Amino acid sequence: MNTYYVVYKPFNVLSQFSSEAGKQTLKDFFDVPLDVYSVGRLDYDSEGLLILTNDKFLNKQLLSPALSHEREYWIQVEGLVTNEAIQQLQNGVTINIDGKLYTTKPCIAKILADPFVPPRNPPIRYRKNIPDSWLMLVLTEGKNRQVRKMTASVGFPTLRLIRYRIEKITIERLQPGEMKILSQGEMYNLLKITKQ
């Protein structure tokens, strides 16, 4: 039987159940059946929404570049984000992917006024003389470390990165290390996926 979980992956946790070099994994936080795995991944140093399931069809649908599902990220960056940087991000910026230059697809980019987010453990390094700000990016593609490369390309290095939403599924009301269980109907509906 297929099972579906929405989890908030904490910072410095691998998006897998098997350990590597003594790092914490999903297994340290989430008690799910052995055949369940994460759909896609979040970098070790990123946090937020992950979907865990044993549904291979859902996995294929969500990871297919042709179906481009919306993914919303909340990013704390160094410096005060300018409207010019937002415009550049919206239009697409050139980043390096595996040694090749790649121009990102147009996306939604906005400055976020102090979003309500759980404290991070450990917290980001606070620097008194350098301000920081938050922005939101909504992407329909997911290249390796894309969000970090995008903010850096417009002059605002990422300090903290949270995936908040995939389509209509969010981590609202979840704390790092918490999960909720969804039915297949709820999951497919919120992800705008049509059953086979």
Image: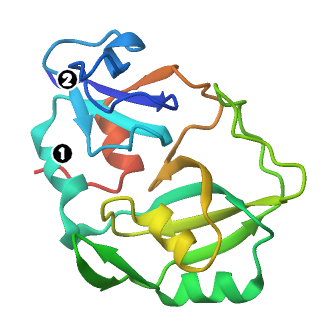
Relative side of 191 to 93, left or right: left
Residue in view at x 41 percent, y 27 percent = 13
Could you tell me if the residues under marks 2 and 1 are in contact, i.e. CB atoms within 8 Å? no
- Label 2, secondary structure: give it: loop
> Looking at the image, is 103 positioned above or below residue 36?
below
Residue in view at x 47 percent, y 40 percent = 45
The answer to which of marks 2 and 1 sits earlier in the sequence is: 2
Amino acid at dot 2: Val
Residue in view at x 56 percent, y 67 percent = 137
Which quarter of the rendered picture does the N terminus lie within? top left
Q: Quadrant of residue 193?
A: bottom left
Residue carrying label 2: 36
Q: Which residue is more in the foreground, 11 or 168?
A: 11
Q: Which residue is more in the foreground, 74 or 187?
A: 74
Q: Position of residue 51 (x, y in %)?
A: 35, 36
Q: Position of residue 32 (x, y in %)?
A: 28, 13
Residue carrying label 1: 59
Q: Position of residue 14 (x, y in %)?
A: 34, 30
> Looking at the image, is 195 positioned above or below residue 81?
above
> Looking at the image, is 140 positioned above or below residue 15?
below
Structural distance between the alpha carbons of marks 2 and 1: 11 Å
> Looking at the image, is 64 positioned above or below residue 152?
above
Q: Position of residue 123 (x, y in %)?
A: 70, 32
